[in-house]
Amino acid sequence: MGSCPSPIAKQRLQIGENKGN
């Protein structure tokens, strides 16, 4: 979570947003 957002982090973020929403 800095300058190079990994694909896994992106997927995790999407999942978290989906679950959070």
Image (tube, grey):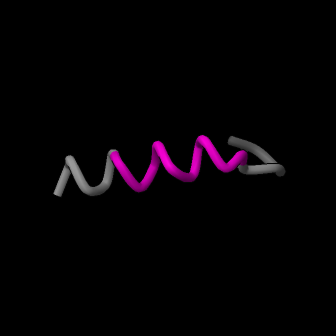
Which quarter of the picture shows residue 9? Answer: top right
**Which segment is the magenta one?**
6-15
Is residue 15 shown left or right of residue 1? left
Which quarter of the picture shows residue 17? Answer: bottom left
Which quarter of the picture shows residue 18? Answer: bottom left
Which one is nearer the viewer's eye here, 2 or 15? 15
Which one is nearer the viewer's eye here, 8 or 2? 8
* Residue furthest left as drawn: 21
Is residue 14 shown left or right of residue 3? left
21 lies above or below 11: below
Is residue 20 shown left or right of residue 8? left
Kindly identify the residue that appears in the image at 76 percent across and 44 percent down.
2
- Which percent across, then down, holds residue 8? 61, 42
Asked whether residue 11 is drawn in magenta, I would say yes
* Residue furthest right as drawn: 3
Q: Quadrant of the N terminus?
A: top right
User: Dominant secondary structure of the magenta stretch?
Assistant: helix
- Which percent across, then down, holds residue 21? 16, 58
Number of numbered tags placed on the structure image:
0
Kindly identify the residue that appears in the image at 83 percent across and 50 percent down.
3
Kindly identify the residue that appears in the image at 57 percent across and 52 percent down.
10
Which one is nearer the viewer's eye here, 5 or 8? 8
